[in-house]
Image (tube, grey):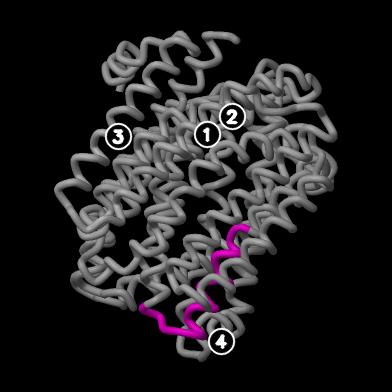
Amino acid sequence: MSKTSYKSIFKSTFLFAFVRVFNIFTKIIVNKAVAIFLGTSGLGIIGIYQTTISLIATFFGFGISKSAIRDISANTHNIKSLSKIISTTNYLIFITSFLGSISTIFLSTFLSKWAFGNQEHIYSFMILSIAVFFTILSEGKLAVLTGMRQLNYLARASIFGCIFGVSPAIFLYYFFQENGIIPSIILVPLANYIFSIFYIKKMNYKKIRLSLKKVLIQGSGMFKMGLSLMYVSLWVFITEYLIKIYISATDSIQMVGLFQAGSTLVMGYFGIITTSMATEYYPRISAIYDKNKELEKEVNKQSKVGLVILGPLVILFLLFTPFFVELLYSTEFLQSINYIKYAIFGVIIIACSNPMGMILLAKQKSSIFLISVTLSRLFGITASVFGYSILGLKGLGLAYLCYAIFELISMKFIMNYFYKIKFETSTMKIMFITLIFCSVAFFIDQLENQSFQYMSILSIFLISLLYSWKVIKKEMHINISQLIKNKIKNV
């Protein structure tokens, strides 16, 4: 296997992991402000607002921002074609942003009733139409940077967007409490849009004026693929949305806040690794979508890198979960640990299933992918409702783990059956050993002797770290110490 490819994965992962860690530290302060000034109910309200906006933006974005990445990346060496595709993308994104914003206003009564069970939030959703507009618009602009593989500009746009979009929320929550929620939500996509525009202007392409007819003709393929991607993204938000609505209806808004805190820690913070890796992975496999042997190599490389990074981090996190929850939120949120310690195992498994799923997107095999996504998400929702009704937050954590296992098994079957793409023995070995390390740490964490807990789990963490280091050095042939030093120097 190519040393260069492994290095490329690590470099892009470290770059965007750094960006997302920076964003997290910024949001830590904001979450702390929410916990202090607004409490669990405030976090629950924010969670429902944000999920609703994401749901609408995903639906009316029609997946164009994601489908554009493939078309842009395939034409980076042809300025004329590249300019035409970017101009088409810009036109389409503006149209969809406008549609999403107007639809939010018209649906405000329905959204308030559906999300909160009353009509007290109608005007809030009307104002949040601004957030929908800039969310779709900023995602489109960031997609241009991603497609052109301008990862440094993409990273800078994300960092500055976070600073100027998230940080002011602290003052808004302090001075206006719950009245500061709406403007704080709007600021984030607005800031992302402003900085993405700034860096796109540095790109080498020409703005082309196109008629609506030409935009629709040029963007028909992009739109068709985008619908499939929109459907997939929509399921992510629908799943989260339905779970939150179910918890709110059967329990309380405070429990929604606890679930929101737990899912943010698991999917948001630990999703740093998988999301960072996917930023560079998708354009890479799109270039070789018809070469199954090369795709098999890439999916194994991607999975291995994810496992060796996540393994030690999960073990360490299991040990310090209460500390992280109190640091990021408050003691009021400690109940979320019941969800976190089970769901976190799902992240390890998702790190292997995601690379396989993205191959279907690169191949544009939308029908197969849509069926698999529908089945796995329906399974996830059913498991979550069943799990919460019996075991509460712990049941939700186990449900997410079961969903991850279901998705991995289904993706392995699809890849092997249709394309003869499968995991190598070495990949399965790394996955098995990683899960063993994490499972032992989990069971030790259940013991009452805290001194024994800390000493034992720290020992397992060190062993896991040494194992990952060995895999990186001997199998991937990478000097990880030098790679980190170089990356720090270039930041």
Where residue 461 is drawn, which disc sits there?
Answer: 3
Kindly report the distance in space between the C-alpha atoms of the residues bearing marks 4 and 2: 47 Å
Where does the image place residue 472, in percent across and percent down from the top left? 43, 17
Q: Earlier in the sequence, mark 4 or mark 2?
A: 4
Disc 2 vs disc 1: Cβ atoms closer than 8 Å? yes
User: Which SS class for mark 4?
Assistant: helix
Kindly report the distance in space between the C-alpha atoms of the residues bearing marks 2 and 1: 6 Å
Quarter of the image holding residue 21? Answer: top left
Q: Earlier in the sequence, mark 3 or mark 1?
A: 1
Q: Earlier in the sequence, mark 3 or mark 2?
A: 2
- Residue of label 1: 432
Where residue 428 is drawn, which disc sits there?
Answer: 2
Q: Which is nearer the eye, 490 or 88?
A: 490
Kindly report the distance in space between the C-alpha atoms of the residues bearing marks 4 and 1: 46 Å
Kindly report the distance in space between the C-alpha atoms of the residues bearing marks 3 and 4: 48 Å
Where does the image place residue 275, in percent across and percent down from the top left? 50, 39
Q: Quadrant of the N terminus?
A: top right
